[in-house]
C-alpha cells in the first residue's frame, strides 16, 4: 500500500471536531491518564482491569506469551463467568435491580428481569442442562430469537463450563449444521419460533433439518434439543430427542453451586460469517475475555451502573451481542434494554419509542441502521423525547462522516459524544475508539487505540507508516480478550492472523493515520480498489456519496475493467425526501464525487437501487454487488439477511445505469 498516499490523503481532512462537554469530561470513567498508565506498565494496567472481576483463585502471572501466538492470560486464576455476571451482584444486594428491560416484538409483550430472577433462571437452566448430560467442556449450540432465554442459556453454559456457540436465528439449517458439526455440539437450544414484523416465524423446522444433516455426517452427535415455547406454533416432535424448556428448566431447582474454572477455560466459539469458505470458529476463553468486555464496557460507554439505562441493538448471534449485550453489561451490573424485533415494526419510530419509554442513556448501534434512519427522515425520531441519551456508539463498519453528524445531532440532540468503536469477533472487545470524556472526536475516525491496546498502521514490509499515510491495521501486543485459536485448527489460526508479519496480529483491515496520528479504518483490504494504479477506498467514495443531500446510503465496489484494472461502481439508495432524484441524478452524483475526492474517484457507473444486500450483522456484501457490476450470475446469497434484495437490485441496475 505504499503507493496510495496521494489518494488516501483526501480522507481525514475532516475539519469538524466534537469535544465532550465539560460536565461529561469531569465525570468520565476513563480519563487521559489511563493512556499514560497503560503505556508505563501495560500488564499492570490489565491486571487492574482484571480486578473488576471476582476471582476464586487469583492469577500468578498476568501473561504467558512464551509460545506465541498462543496467549495465556491471568495464568493460574480461577473464576466463573456466570457468577461474575449474576450471583455476585445479588450477593452485593442488587438482586432487585433490573438486569434487562426486555421488549418483545408484539407491543404489549414486555418483561423486566431483575438480577435475582436472572440468577434463579440461570441456575435452573444449568441444572436442566446438567440433567441432559451437559458437562464441563461439552459444546452447546444456541439458536434462539432475541428472548431472555437466549441470555439465560448462554450464562447457564458458562456456569457449567460448557462452551456455547450462538448461531444467529436468521441463519439457515445449513449454517447451523455446519457449526454444530465443526464444534461438536451435543445439545441445541432453540425455540418453536420467533416474531418478526408482526408475524410468528418458525425456527424449529430449521433445527430438525440441521439435525438430519448432522446425523448423516456424525450419527449420534446431537443428543438433545431443548425447545423454548415462544410463539406456540405447532412443531414436529421427536420424543427421544426433543425436550421442552418450560418442562425441564421450568421444573429445575433454582439452587446451583457453581464451579470455578481456569482463566483459560473456553467460554465460547463464535463463527464468523459472510466470507467464503469454511466458517472460522473464533475461540474466546474466560478470564481475559471477561476482563476485556467489562473494562471496555465500563470505560468506552462510561457506564454508571446505578443511573444508566444501556441499550445495544445488536443481535445476540453476533459478537457485539456477546460482549456488549451480555458479558460486558452484566459483569458491570448494568441495566439494559433487550429488544426482540426490527426497527420498523410496527412503525419506523419503534426504537425511539423504546428510548423514550425506558429513558435510555447509552445507545450502541451500527452505521447501516443509522443510514436507514437518515433515509427515513428526521421527522420520525423528532416525534420522541430522547433527552435521556448521553452517549452514542457505533460499530460494525466505518461510519460515514455525514451519518456520524446526523446521529449526533438528530438522535443525540447535539450533546452526546459518539464513540466509533473498531473491533472484531477476533478481538473480543473494543480496540480503537475515542474515549467519550477525553477525545475531541472527528466524524469518521475511530481515533486511537484505547489504553492497554497497542495498534499500528504498517506498510507491506510491516514497518510503521508515518502520519498522513495508509497501510494495514495491526495489533502489536497481545491483549486479554484476543481470540486464542480457531476451534480445532491451530494452524489456520497462525496462518490467518499471524503469518503476514512476525509478531503482529493482522485481521484484514486497511487504515490510514491522519496528520495527527488518528486512525481512519478504511474497511477490509479486499475492499480497497485499484483504479489505474491508484488505490481508492470504497469507504471514502461511499462517504462522499452519502454527503450528497439526496443520498441515504451507498455501496461501492471495484469491478474489473479492461482499461483501468478496476472501475468504481456505486449502488445508491436515495433519501425518501429526494423522490426519484431527478433526471440528472447520476451525473449530479458523479460530479459530486469528483468534487469531494477527485476525478479519479468518479464512479464509472452509478446504480440507483431500493436496497443493498447485507449480512445479518449488517455488513454490505460487496461480493454480490461486484457480481452485478460485472454482469455475472449472482453468487451464494445464503448469508444475506433478505435474499430477495438481489432481485430488486438487479431490476434497479437494469433501469438506472
Ligand atoms: C464488532 C464487529 C469486524 C470487521 C472489522 C472491520 C469492520 C467493525 C468498525 C469497522 C470501521 C468501525 N468494523 N467496526 N470498520 N469502523 N468502527 O463488527 O465484528 O463482525 O467480526 O466485524 O468489521 O472491517 O474487521 P465483526
Image (cartoon, rainbow, N blue to C red):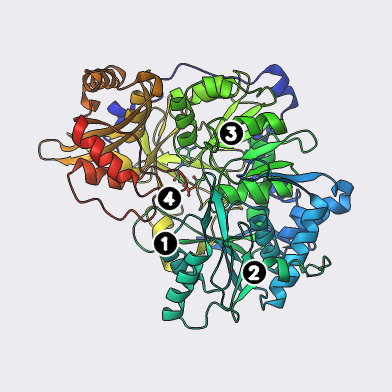
Q: Nearer the viewer, residue 224 or 239?
A: 239
Picture disc at residue 279: 1
Q: Residue furthest left?
A: 563
Q: Can residue 442 be spotted in the picture?
A: no
Q: Position of residue 73 (x, y in %)?
A: 64, 58
Q: Secondary structure at mark 3?
A: helix
**Vertical placement of residue 540 versus 104, above or below:** above
Disc 4: residue Cβ within 8 A of ligand 1's nearest atom: yes
Q: Are marks 2 and 1 in contact (CB under 8 Å)?
A: no
Residue found 20% across the figure and 51% down from its top: 633
Quarter of the figure with the C terminus: top left
Circle 4/circle 2 CB separation < 8 Å: no
Question: Which quarter of the picture shows residue 311?
Answer: top right
Local packing at callout 3 (Cα closer than 10 Å; few below 14, some 14-19, many 20+) is many
Quick one: label 3 or label 4, which is nearer the N terminus?
A: 3
Residue at mark 2 to residue at mark 3: CA–CA distance: 36 Å
| Pointer 4 or 1: first along the chain | 1
Judging by the rendered image, the residue that carries numbered circle 3 is 350
Residue 162: image tag: 2
**Which residue: 64% across, 73% down?**
243
How far apart marks 3 and 1 lie (CA) works out to: 34 Å
**Dot 4, how many residues are within 10 Å of its Cα: few (below 14), some (14-19), or many (20+)?**
some
Give the mark, 4 or 2, whose residue is nearer the N terminus.
Answer: 2
**Seen in the image, is 227 located left or right of residue 172?**
right
Q: Residue at x 21, y 26 (%)?
A: 600
The percent position of residue 24, horizontal first and vertical second, equals: 70, 23
Amino acid at each position: 500500500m505504499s503507493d496510495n498516499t496521494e489518494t488516501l490523503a483526501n480522507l481525514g481532512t475532516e475539519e469538524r471536531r466534537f469535544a465532550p462537554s465539560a460536565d461529561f469530561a469531569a465525570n468520565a470513567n476513563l480519563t487521559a491518564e489511563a493512556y499514560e498508565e497503560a503505556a508505563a506498565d501495560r500488564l499492570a494496567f490489565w491486571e487492574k482491569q482484571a480486578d473488576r472481576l471476582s476471582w476464586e483463585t487469583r492469577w500468578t502471572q498476568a501473561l504467558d506469551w512464551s509460545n506465541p501466538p498462543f496467549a495465556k492470560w491471568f495464568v493460574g486464576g480461577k473464576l466463573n463467568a456466570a457468577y461474575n455476571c449474576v450471583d455476585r451482584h445479588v450477593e452485593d444486594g442488587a438482586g432487585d435491580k433490573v438486569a434487562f428491560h426486555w421488549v418483545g416484538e408484539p407491543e404489549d409483550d414486555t418483561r423486566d428481569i431483575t438480577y435475582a430472577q436472572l440468577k434463579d433462571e440461570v441456575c435452573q437452566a444449568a441444572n436442566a442442562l446438567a440433567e441432559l448430560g451437559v458437562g464441563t467442556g461439552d459444546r452447546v449450540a444456541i439458536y434462539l430469537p432475541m428472548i431472555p432465554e437466549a441470555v439465560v442459556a448462554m450464562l447457564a453454559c458458562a456456569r457449567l463450563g460448557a462452551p456455547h456457540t450462538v448461531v444467529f436465528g436468521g441463519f439457515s439449517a445449513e449454517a447451523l449444521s455446519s457449526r454444530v458439526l465443526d464444534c461438536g455440539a451435543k445439545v441445541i437450544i432453540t425455540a418453536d419460533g420467533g416474531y418478526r414484523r408482526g408475524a410468528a416465524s418458525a425456527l424449529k423446522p430449521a433445527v430438525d433439518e440441521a439435525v438430519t444433516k448432522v446425523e448423516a455426517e456424525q450419527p449420534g452427535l446431537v443428543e438433545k434439543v431443548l425447545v423454548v415455547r415462544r410463539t406456540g406454533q405447532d412443531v414436529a416432535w421427536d420424543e427421544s430427542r426433543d425436550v421442552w424448556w418450560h418442562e425441564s428448566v421450568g421444573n429445575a431447582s433454582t439452587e446451583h453451586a457453581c464451579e470455578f474454572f481456569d482463566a483459560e477455560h473456553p467460554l465460547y466459539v463464535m463463527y464468523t460469517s459472510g466470507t467464503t469458505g469454511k466458517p472460522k470458529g473464533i475461540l474466546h476463553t474466560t478470564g481475559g475475555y471477561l476482563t476485556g468486555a467489562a473494562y471496555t464496557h465500563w470505560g468506552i460507554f462510561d457506564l454508571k451502573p446505578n443511573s444508566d439505562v444501556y441499550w445495544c441493538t445488536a443481535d445476540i448471534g453476533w459478537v457485539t451481542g456477546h460482549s456488549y449485550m451480555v458479558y460486558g453489561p452484566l459483569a458491570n451490573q448494568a441495566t439494559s434494554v433487550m429488544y426482540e424485533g426490527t426497527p420498523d415494526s410496527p412503525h419506523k419510530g419503534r426504537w425511539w419509542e423504546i428510548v423514550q419509554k425506558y429513558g435510555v442513556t447509552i445507545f450502541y448501534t451500527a452505521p447501516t441502521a443509522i443510514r436507514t434512519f437518515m433515509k427515513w427522515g428526521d421527522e420520525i425520531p423528532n416525534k420522541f423525547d430522547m433527552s435521556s441519551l448521553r452517549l452514542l456508539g457505533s460499530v460494525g463498519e466505518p461510519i460515514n462522516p455525514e451519518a456520524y453528524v446526523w446521529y449526533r445531532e438528530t438522535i443525540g440532540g447535539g450533546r452526546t459524544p459518539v464513540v466509533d468503536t473498531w473491533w472484531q469477533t477476533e478481538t473480543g472487545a473494543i480496540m480503537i475508539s475515542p474515549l467519550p470524556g477525553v477525545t475531541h472526536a472527528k466524524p469518521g475516525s475511530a481515533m486511537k487505540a484505547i489504553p492497554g491496546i497497542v495498534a499500528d498502521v504498517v506498510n507491506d514490509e510491516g514497518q510503521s507508516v508515518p502520519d498522513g499515510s495508509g497501510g494495514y491495521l495491526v495489533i502489536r501486543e497481545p491483549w486479554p480478550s484476543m481470540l486464542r485459536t480457531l476451534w480445532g485448527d491451530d494452524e489456520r489460526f497462525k496462518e490467518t492472523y499471524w503469518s503476514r508479519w512476525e509478531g503482529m496480529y493482522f485481521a484484514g483491515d486497511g487504515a490510514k493515520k491522519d496528520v495527527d496520528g488518528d486512525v481512519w479504518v478504511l474497511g477490509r483490504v479486499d475492499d480497497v480498489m485499484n483504479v489505474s494504479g491508484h488505490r481508492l477506498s470504497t469507504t471514502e467514495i461511499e462517504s462522499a456519496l452519502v454527503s450528497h443531500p439526496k443520498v441515504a446510503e451507498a455501496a461501492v465496489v471495484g469491478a474489473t475493467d479492461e482499461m483501468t484494472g478496476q472501475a468504481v461502481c456505486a449502488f445508491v439508495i436515495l433519501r425518501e425526501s429526494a423522490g426519484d432524484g431527478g433526471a440528472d441524478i447520476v451525473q449530479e452524483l458523479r460530479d459530486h464525487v469528483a468534487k469531494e475526492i477527485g476525478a479519479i474517484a468518479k464512479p464509472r457507473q452509478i446504480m440507483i437501487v431500493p436496497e443493498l444486500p447485507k449480512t445479518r450483522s449488517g455488513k454490505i456484501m460487496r461480493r454480490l454487488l461486484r457480481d452485478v457490476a460485472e454482469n455475472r450470475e449472482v453468487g451464494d446469497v445464503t448469508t444475506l439477511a433478505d435474499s430477495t434484495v438481489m432481485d430488486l437490485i438487479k431490476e434497479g441496475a437494469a433501469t438506472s445505469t
